[in-house]
Amino acid sequence: MTETLGIWVAAILTLAIFSFLWKDNPLFRLAEHLLVGISAGYYLVQYAYSAIYKKLYVPLIDQGNLLFIGCAILGLLVFTRLIPKRSWLSRYPIAFYVAAGAGYSIPSGLQARVVKQMQISMINIFGQDTLWANISALVLFIGVVSVLIYFFFSAEHKGVLGFFSRIGIIFLMVGFGASFGYTVMSRITLLIGRLQFILGNWLGFL
Amino acid sequence: MFRRTIPLIFAFTVGTFMVVQFFIPHPTFLAIYNGVLDWQQVIFGFVLIVGTLSMVRHHIMRLKFRKEGYQYSMVALGGLVCMIAAGIYGGIRGGPYKWLFDYVQMPTQASMFSLLAFFVASASYRAFRARNVTATLLLLAGVIVMLGRVPAGEYIRIGDFSMREVAIWILDYPNTAAKRGILIGVGLGMSATALKIILGIETSYLGKGD
Amino acid sequence: MKLSKILLGIDRRYIFIGVALSIALPLLMPIGFGTSVTRQVQDVYDFVENLEDGSTVIMSFDYEPSTMAELDPMARSMLKHLFRKNARILGMALLAGAPGIAENVLREETELAGREYGEDWVFLGYVPAPTAAMLRIGEDISMVYPTDQYGTPLTEFPVMKGVKNYRNIDLVISYSSTAMPQFWAQYAHDRYGAPVAVGATAVEAIRMYPYHDSGQIVGFLGGLKGAAEYESLMGEPGEGIKGMDAQTIAHLFMVLMIIIGNIGHFAERRGS
């Protein structure tokens, strides 16, 4: 019974959202604001339960780990963000959070995004199994180098630098085109999901 | 001093420690590192709560001052209260909290994003033009990937190759090269920004004012 | 009437109808397109296939309802494969909107596979600050998740026996619509050596190619096509394969609209 009711509610809300395709209307705005409220409530419960209860209350109160007192103080200071005259106090927990994240991201980020990627780019472009594989490896190498050259803005893009910069633009355009193709694929899939629900779960045609 | 300087010194201390600990597997460093990560999770939880409460405050203000569309704010706040009540009284393991998620939040959120399929089609028709060489390259790559990555790509041929094979080659080589170049650039940029934050050069995260 | 005016004057509502029909009709009247497998998906499949019986796998549901149409099918398919290998599943969520989805996928698939909660799988739940969580699991998972999602201490679950950190985890799978897989590769793999496989939306999958090429991830599934490929390797058609007909026709329609738009554009430039 609750499932049947739920499917009808879901279907009506889905059609209300889709009504925006005709034009903005009160039904769409109702569904939109209902989503805002329901999801805000869902997130608040999750944050309160997982962050406040499980990760602060349990270690501090249940397990008596007094080191979490500092954490509790910093956490409560975040609420001063809502009080304009005292919002400067929230800078302490935000500074802690942002700086900690910045700190551990430097060595890891350089390792994962720079060193490892540079390492794999230093391939033996003439040591592949077939001629086509060698050509492809050469394309990959030239592509990486030319894209990096394109993003080097400290010198004017003319002469040899300008030539490789234009090659870089070609690779970037191909990359963005591929991204566009995948983006279209992604968006279409989301609609497939909703139509499967409408035609299958609700109307029973599938 | 307490409004800006001390937070920046605090940031410098924490940030520098987190960089240095990567290279020092000493138990004391590890214990402090673990503590920082635990604290980060709690603080982030509070930040998320405050963010959500800011949104709630916006709707309360709209309702209080009867601004345009305040009736919708009533719906939003009503939904919020229902969900919180469902979570508190019914628990998060099922019951009304799960029901509202499954049959209200999930379909509405999914439907919102599925609208993009319509708009991407309309926008592509209206704006995706082969105006010059680079735009043509972008268009061709996009079309090849769109056709090559679906089963129909097996049956459409460009010379000796199927659209699927061409799409796979584009994805594995030129696309990977471009994404790798961007990734290296982003990695360097992220590290530079992180360093600026730790050194107190980048202070936008502290907000405006003194 | 000028050709350009006709071609460029199509009302967007007709385009919307065209998109809807190009998806709805193949769903109602399936065509049965097959699907070939790419190297990236094959690598994930082979890795899971080569896992030892009883391996421990983290499945991180890092997506919200907005992208579940793309990611649910691949999560379900991989879960079926993992259960064939008798893997122990540790489900978790690093986005606030994910626990509800994760519960649905895990409960339905474990019920079908006859797996018991606590013995074969557990749902650890949601924690905030994803990157901090990824790093903390590298030292001690029980400090990130002292209990499961429902408040039961982890020590009470046989499935958690002997699991302290990534050294005891045989595979991490991240299903994500965000840049989360990049951080899994950066922290779980590069720092702690855990093998990472990725299930990503198509929008994010395009960014995974360099990571796969460098070996930072074992492979990845991209969008519904990735799910369809995995289902075909499994020999168990699911939502992925079912959606391929609609995906194909919709793509053909998109390309047609782009071609029409460009013909109209060039006709306009030539003055016809």
Image: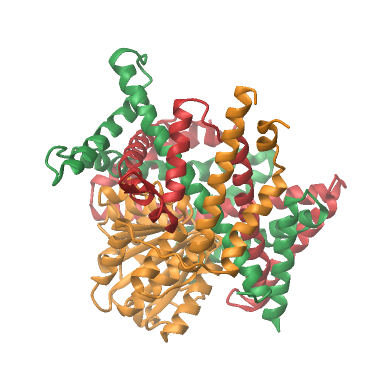
Shown colour of chain C: orange
State which chain is coloured green.
Answer: A
State which chain is coloured red.
Answer: B
What residue is drawn where x is 71% and y is 59%? Answer: A37
Residue C181 percent coordinates (x, y): 39, 53
Is residue C106 visible from the viewing direction of this image? yes
Q: Nearer the viewer, residue A135 or C65?
A: A135
Q: Could you tell whether B67 is left or right of B206 in the image?
A: right
Q: Could you tell whether C247 is left or right of B196 in the image?
A: right
Q: Nearer the viewer, residue B19 or A62?
A: B19
Q: Locate the C terminus of chain B and report the quarter of the image it occupies.
A: top right
- Residue extending farthest left: A127
What residue is drawn where x is 81% and y is 57%? Answer: B74
Q: Could you tell whether B17 is left or right of A99 in the image?
A: left
When asked about the image quadrant of residue A89, the answer is: top right
Q: Is residue A109 above or below residue C266?
A: below
Residue A64 percent coordinates (x, y): 46, 68
- Residue extending farthest right: B66
